Image (cartoon, rainbow, N blue to C red):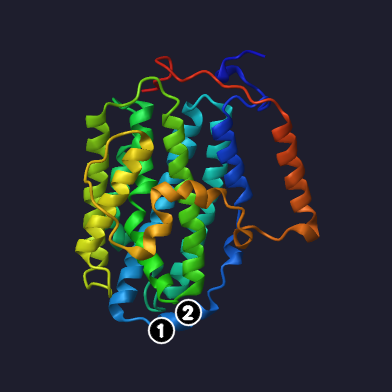
Amino acid sequence: MSTNDCDRLVIFPIRHRTLWRMYEQARESFWLPSEVNLATDSVEWKTKLTDAERHSLLVVLAFFATADGVVADNVIQRFSGEVPMMEAKYFYGFQAMMENIHAETYDILLETFLPSNVDKTNFLDHALQLTTVGLKNAWAKRWMDVDGRTFSERLVAFACVEGIFFSSSFAIVFWFKSRGLLPGLTFSNDLISRDEGLHTQFACELLRLFDEKPPQWVVHTIVAEAADIEVRFAKESLHEPLPGVSAQDMLYYVRFVADQLLQALGYQPLFHVENPFPFMMMISMPSRVNFFERQNSEYRKARANHGAVADEELCVAASRSHTFTDGPVIGRAFSPN
């Protein structure tokens, strides 16, 4: 077999060990929307939330429900066909499926929480046309355009989509979790934020393989744009502050997340702010690696009755029995633009 990644027809021996292990993490974290029980949520939505809290969550869900489709389109239409490493292709294939799982879950949440007299399609159309939900989606779609943009620049942009554009929305849902409300929604948020964090981490690891990375000023410009849009979205979703969560707090949090992402990508921070939310300390970027690597049983499906656990462990053992080799670093030849 040729040592050129583009000529590979089989996955073993593994050449890019870190990317493969991240694929394994994604595969072992598989879950289904049917695991999320919303019976309690539908009652608490009507009886324990204020109008302002319901407004915030509906804005968040409007973004969630539309954003995963954009991310999946980019993975399928762009990144999967452009990246030469087979380990990355495996990861992107699994990511596309998980984005569908996320989108299905958000659709179910909207079906559960939207008032019966509100048409979901009209609600989402309104969100895309008249709010920053549309602005965030338009920014992401703009970065799907390959003209004049290197792969590495677009990789940074979509790390911002999953690492910054989801940040204030995840924070709002985690705030509800800190109050012991909406157990189904918050459980799905645990699962999805873990998945999206892994996707972001994967982008950071993939960028490390490039000899020629975007200059810092370019990356700072991309990240600053994304952070500014996310701050505007947060102000819109928090038109009335939640107890302990103001729009100003969210500005600091978004900038904190942006700095964490910059450092994970290998660049200097831009904003130099601290995390204002104690309830978000566990999912800040530096702790995410440990968060993903924990073998936490609550996130793994009980498949023993069907033999799936044994089969999965057999596949993992087989993959680890093969020799890992250090693949060539991506250089000037890989610049699909």
Tell me which corner region of the image, top left, top right, bottom left or bottom right, holds residue 71.
Answer: top left
Q: Nearer the viewer, residue 64 or 323?
A: 323
Label 1: few (<14), some (14–19) or many (≥20) C-alpha neighbours in 10 Å: few
Query: Farthest bottom residue?
Result: 47
Q: Nearer the viewer, residue 113 or 94?
A: 94
Above or below, 143 against 112 in this view is above
Question: In the image, what residue occupies the spot 57% across and 72% down?
Answer: 37
Q: CA distance from mark 1 to mark 2?
A: 7 Å
Question: In the image, what residue occupies the spot 43% across and 39% down?
Answer: 74
Dot 1 lies on which element?
Answer: helix
Quadrant of image for the N terminus: top right
Does any portion of residue 86 appear in the rendered image?
A: yes
Q: x%, y% of residue 284? A: 39, 53
From the image, tell me which residue sits under label 2.
Answer: 42
Question: In the image, what residue occupies the spot 54% across and 55% down?
Answer: 101
Does any portion of residue 99 appear in the rendered image?
A: no
From the image, tell me which residue sits under label 1.
Answer: 46
